[in-house]
Image (cartoon, rainbow, N blue to C red):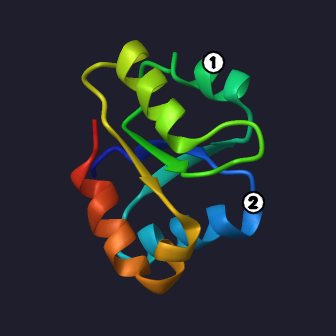
Amino acid sequence: MTKPLRILHLEDRPAEAELALRELRKEGIQFTAKRVVTEANFLAALQDAELDLILADYALPSYDGLSALVAARQERPRCLSYSSPARWAKRRPSRLCSTALWTMC
């Protein structure tokens, strides 16, 4: 049995977070996810040594996916992240899953 992926998900809207995670479940991917909303919580969560994958919303009220990507690359240079505008993910959720898996740590 393989170890479930540990996902850090930067997303301010619970429905959007569930949409992305539902697509992973549909593909049969086993995971645990931690959703964070703020920059401070995101930066703290980057310290998790067991982190496998980062998903980040492109635009949040006080933070954004590009800034999160910069922070992730500074803190976790061997870990990549995926940032997706919610509108794109809604239209093409199956691509969200395949792209997210492509960017695993």
Residue at screen point 53% across, 67% down: 20
Q: Secondary structure at mark 2?
A: loop
Residue at screen point 52% across, 16% down: 47
For residue 63, which quarter of the picture?
top right
Q: Earlier in the sequence, mark 1 or mark 2?
A: 2
Q: x%, y% of residue 82?
A: 39, 49
Task: Identify the disc placed on residue 44.
Answer: 1
Task: Identify the disc placed on residue 62.
Answer: none
Instruction: Using the numbered discs, state the Cα–Cα distance from disc 1 to disc 2 in whole angstroms.
Output: 20 Å
Q: x%, y% of residue 51?
A: 43, 31
For residue 6, which quarter of the picture?
top left
Q: Amino acid at mark 1?
A: Ala
Residue at screen point 37% across, 64% down: 29
**Quadrant of the frame with the C terminus:** top left
Total numbered labels placed on residues in the image? 2
Residue at screen point 60% across, 41% down: 64
Q: Secondary structure at mark 1?
A: helix
Q: Are marks 1 and 2 in contact (CB under 8 Å)?
A: no
- The residue where tag 2 is placed is 13
Q: Is residue 10 left or right of residue 2?
A: right
Q: Is residue 36 above or below residue 73?
A: below
Q: Is residue 104 above or below residue 27?
A: above
Name the foreground residue: 41 vs 24.
Answer: 41
